[in-house]
Amino acid sequence: VSAVEAAREHLEQIEAVDGSLHAFLATDPEASLAAARSIDERRAAGEELGELAGVPLAIKDVLVTTDMPATSGSRILEGYRSPYDATSVAKARAAGLVNIGKTNMDEFAMGSSTENSAYGPTRNQWAGDRVPGGSGGGSAVAVGAFEAPLALGSDTGGSIRQPAALTGTVGAKPTYGGVSRYGAIALASSLDQIGPVARTVLDTALLHDVIAGHDHHDSTSLDFAWPSMAQAARGGADPGTLKGLRVGVVKQLMIDGVQPGVKASFEASLALLEAQGAEIVEIDAPHFEYAVAAYYLILPAEASSNLAKYDSVRFGLRVTPEGGGTVETVMSDTRAAGFGAEVKRRIILGTYALSAGYYDAYYGSAQKVRTLIQRDFAQAFQQVDVIASPTAPTTAWCLGEHSGDPMQDYLNDATTIPANLAGIPGLSLPIGLAAEDGLPVGLQLMAPAYEDARLYRAGAAIE
Ligand code: GLN
């Protein structure tokens, strides 16, 4: 098929299903078709284009692009348009991918259900009364509902992997620094990572290869010659590829709240790994039980600082009180109207944790816990090559089920957060349906930093 045909068919699918799913915040059919047309013209002129040239790409609204708005799911950025492309987007364009639309997300990527979007929730394509996970529920559903074959997401505490698990799609959080964060609207800069979403491990790997690599615009970007993830994924099909692979199961990640059907699917996938020659090793990571607590101090602290720039002057919304107001009242009215409840909660938590009298007790302690979790991983990876866990302790819950109780959302992140605190890569792939509700379950694989390719090989082998 031509790029134009691919774009047109996906735009038709969006037209057909997105009224009820609401995976997209913005589309611009003319812009998408124009981009597709230019790919077809370049191909017709004999230009050698990459494997993904002409493939439609959905882009989480946390990434800025010149051709469509970027809101990060917030009212405060309503109407904002970027003068430049995020590096991951620029790389995707250079590879010939076609922006098919911007996807819905929890406001500023704070959430686990996409219900915190200021523009209304996204619905899970498996069951319309269920959440798709979050914060990247839009990208996961876009891919899962065939509105786009590929999508970009961001993962600060699980926002690529957990929605992938809850929607039966594949998502990867690369090694911290593996993909540039330039042009990604920052949530917590020491945790944020951009990554790919797709329907198969190989497709995820192909997109990973396109967006990875050093970028001088991002000071934490790694200057490293990444091996091909696609080649690793293709290697997953080789017989005996898992022979001798040591797979760790962390006791502390099999938390009490793991749903029976999730546990059963997870155990079945361990058996699958074993049947292919992998060795399952139980490991201990004593500090993982403090990961959620540490994360929900570090993240709000960094977020409160990153969100200080929404001051009514530089970006988006401006609310002027009657009679004109002062600099202070314009700023406070704008922030009061522009930010949702979860964002305000985290700004207050973050500024509190960073304040002079409490800094050591909260932020300082959380950073120490972060170091201990990194050490737990380092020790674990002396015994095993990869770590496996359920991506999320439960399958998709009902819309509104957690409302008024943010702790329930926070606890759902217990399995994904440790990888962000340590900067290591994680991959989520579907491993079946839970017996009790028939909803998809995800397997999470984690590897040491720089070893993303290991995840694609192992994931593809048992997919
Ligand atoms: N659920 C987590 C949070 O609310 C994950 C966020 C993310 O990865 N962007 O912080």
Image (spheres, rainbow, N blue to C red):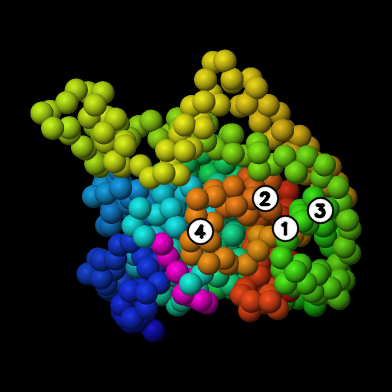
**Residue lying farthest bottom?**
1
Vertical arrangement, residue 245 with respect to residue 358, above or below = below
Q: Quadrant of residue 29?
A: bottom left
Labels 4 and 3 touching (C-beta < 8 A): no
Regarding mark 2 in the picture, which secondary structure is present there? loop
Q: Residue at x 33, y 61 (%)?
A: 25
Closest to the observer: 269 or 424? 269
Q: Which residues are magenta?
A: 121-128
Q: For the residues marked 1 and 4, what is the alpha-carbon distance in whole angstroms?
A: 18 Å
C-alpha gap between disc 3 and disc 1: 15 Å
Percent across and percent down for residue 411 are 64, 50
Which quadrant of the rendered structure holds the C terminus? bottom right
Marking on residue 414: 2
The tally of labels here is 4
Packing grade of label 3 (10 A; few <14, some 14-19, many >=20) is many
Amino acid on which disc 2 is placed: Ala
Of the two numbered discs 4 and 3 in the rendering, the one whose residue sits closer to the viewer: 4
Residue type of the residue flagged with mark 4: Ser
Distance from disc 2 to disc 3, alpha carbons, whole Å, reads 12 Å
Q: What residue is shown with label 3?
A: 250
| Mark 2 and mark 4: Cα distance apart in space | 15 Å
Mark 2 or 1: the one toward you: 1
Mark drawn on residue 113: 4
Looking at the image, which residue is at 86% across and 71% down?
A: 274
- Residue sticking out furthest to the front: 404
Upstream in the sequence, badge 3 or badge 1?
A: 3
Q: Circle 1 sits in a helix, a strand or a loop, which is it?
A: loop
Task: Give the residue at mark 1.
Answer: 257
Q: Is the Cβ of the residue at disc 2 closer than 8 Å to that at disc 1?
A: yes
Q: Nearer the viewer, mark 2 or mark 3?
A: 2
Q: Amino acid at mark 3?
A: Val
SS category of the residue bearing label 3: strand
